[in-house]
Structures are given as structure tokens and as C-alpha cells.
Amino acid sequence: MAKLTLAKASVEDLKKEIARRQRKLPTLIAARDALNCQIAELGGLGSVKAVPKRAKRKPAKKRVRKDKGMARAGSLSSKLAEVFQGKKKLSIAEAIQAVLAAGYKTKAKNFSSMVSDTLAKDKRFRRVGRGVYALKG
């Protein structure tokens, strides 16, 4: 019988092929189990259970910010920029008080770390001294 490709196969041919493979399945499983027993005897491991293969993970999609230069309206960095407007420089403690007074809501236990990290990493701010920042420009 000539090899049949799926693209050219009729629905009836596909049903026949599925039925043929289902009939053959129990003998294949029995042969696999017998081979596993032989492998176990050769290895001295006793009975070996079939170990299922792990499914491969899909690679994570990279998230891309659409507006790379602009921060979200209610974000910490945008609130800090608002607070720094018109002020020459602020310490981290003063910035924290000003941001909270401006209405920024947080439940963070390490809010001072978040503020200092934001000030250090955001390109809109520059470090003037130890723990003291100002707006660039």
C-alpha cells in the first residue's frame, strides 16, 4: 500500500488509520513494559516505572513599554517629578513626606527603599549629595 499523506487523505481513510493504530496500541504497550522489565533486570533496579516526560516551557514574552520615556500618570516616579517641580533639592525623607502628602497611596513596608531606588534609577533626577536629589535641567 502506498504511503498516504494527511493532506490528500479522505476522512474515511483517516478514520481507518485511527482505528488501525488503536488496535495496535495494546501490543505496543505490552512490548514497552517487557522492555522496561528487561532494562530493570540488567540494571539491578527491580521494577522500573515509566517516567513521564516533562512538557517544554514556552519562552516568556518580553514586555515592551509603549511609551519608553514617559511614566504612567499615577506612578511613583511621576508623583516624585510633580513633587520636585519648583524645588531645588530634596532629601529622600522629604521626598517621601511630600509624595504621601500629594496623595500617593502605598501599602509598602519598604517605601523608603522604593523611593530611593526610583530617584537613583530614573533619568529625570540627579544626585546632588548623599541621599539628596534634584530634578535635571
Image: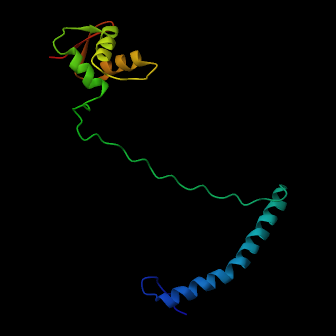
Q: Is 75 situated above or below 135?
A: below
Q: Quick one: which residue is furthest to the top in this view?
A: 129
Q: Residue at x 23, y 8 (%)?
A: 89
Residue beneath the point at 76% across and 74% down: 30
> Where on the picture, by quarter, is residue 28?
bottom right
Q: Quadrant of residue 66?
A: top left
Q: Quadrant of the N terminus?
A: bottom right
Indicate the quadrant containing the C terminus: top left, top right, bottom left or bottom right.
Answer: top left
* Residue 52 position within the rendered picture, expressed as x and y whole percent measured from the top left: 66, 58
Rendered location of residue 136, percent (x, y): 18, 17
Q: Residue at x 79, y 70 (%)?
A: 34
Residue at the (23%, 20%) spot, across then down? 81
Report how many numbered discs are placed on residues in the image.
0
Residue 99 position in % (x across, y down)? 30, 17
Residue 114 versus residue 40 in the image, above or below: above
From the viewer's perspective, is 17 left or right of 64? Answer: right
- Between residue 29 and residue 132, name the one nearer to us: 132
- x, y (%) of residue 8? 43, 87
- Occupied quadrant, residue 49: bottom right
